Image (cartoon, rainbow, N blue to C red):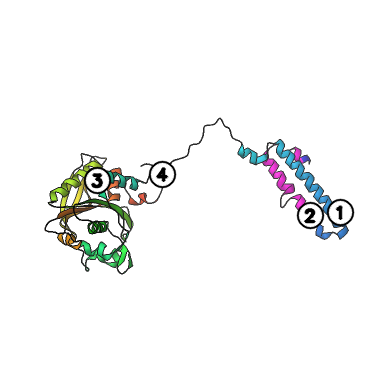
Amino acid sequence: MEALHLVVDADTLEKWRIRYLGMKGAVRAAMTLLKELSPEQRRDFGRLANEVKNTLTAAYERRKAELGGGEESRRLAVDVTLPGAGLRIGHRHVITQTIEEITEIFARMGFSVAYGPEVEDERHNFEALNIPPDHLARDELANFYITPSVMLRSQTSTVQIRVMESQPPPVRVISPGRVYRPDTVDATHSYMFHQLEGLYVDEGVTMADLKSDVDQFCKAYFGPEVATRFRPSFFPFTEPSAEVDMLFHYADGSTAWLELGGCGMVDPNVLEAVGYDSERYTGWAFGLGIERMLMRKYNIPDIRLLFENDVRFLRQF
């Protein structure tokens, strides 16, 4: 009891409780001696031990109250004069922000938004897009096949087929979404990324419309000083086809042409596959990488930063 009177703070009081009333304290140790006593001695000793325990417990509670309730009360003490701690409010991921910004730009240009399933069949992923069975893009090593004829979509071009199957021309849509390819992950590649598909089908649509619309979008997203160019290329679902490049300006003043994606005039076979009259209607289509665009805009050097969920990085956008 004298030791209890010397206690002056909650930490010391807790040490006293553990020493005398804890699971390995003095009172519990004394109770273990009961098994060595006779029945008569055990009764008297047990009564005495309980009295000692109750006396120490009552003394402990009194001292605890005198010290202001011990550690628990100290934790609950609040200085109401201190300024409050505000909650940190999250925000949308930079990829989501980019998709919404792109969608808004194309909405001003008269395009609606279309979405499609991420698990696709071969018809929508390949056949209707004029990709023959022996094309390398259909190889098992180039796709995530679920069954021999069903896979995770490798491009959002699948959505243009579904849109054209569901409505007659004219068609002006964009389709942002996730696509999947078994690429080795590095600074510029990922097995999952986001793609933006654009499609415009109507009477009299030409390559000039494609170049004008893509250039207008790039200037709206990257800035009016941006220059674009179109290089001849080949895709099974467009003819003629081109690669879209943007002149990128680095911080040190140097410049370089960087690829954004592919585009071209919709192949007549694709129009016929969805029941459109290819003699009456023409159209253009493009596919741009969303991560590639935002990495260029924000000077992000590694695509993996977008998927690691490091809030120190994501808070910047």
| Viewer-nearest of discs 1 and 3 | 3
Compared across the picture, whether 148 is left or right of 264 comes to: right
Which numbered circle lies on residue 304?
A: none
Q: Is residue 101 above or below residue 31?
A: above
Given the image, on which type of amino acid does mark 2 rest? Met
Q: Are marks 4 and 1 in contact (CB under 8 Å)?
A: no
Outermost residue to the top: 81
- Secondary structure under tag 3 reads helix
Which numbered circle lies on residue 31?
A: 2
Which callout, 4 or 1, points at the residue further toward the start of the chain? 1
Q: Is residue 17 magenta?
A: yes
Q: Quadrant of the N terminus?
A: top right
Which callout, 2 or 4, points at the residue further toward the start of the chain? 2
Rendered location of residue 158, percent (x, y)? 26, 59
In the picture of the structure, the residue carrying the numbered disc 4 is 312
Given the image, on which type of amino acid does mark 3 rest? Phe
Q: Quadrant of the C terminus?
A: top left
The 10 Å Cα crowd at callout 4, few under 14, some 14 to 19, many 20 or more, is few
Give the distance between the C-alpha atoms of the residues marked 2 and 4, in whole angstroms.
56 Å
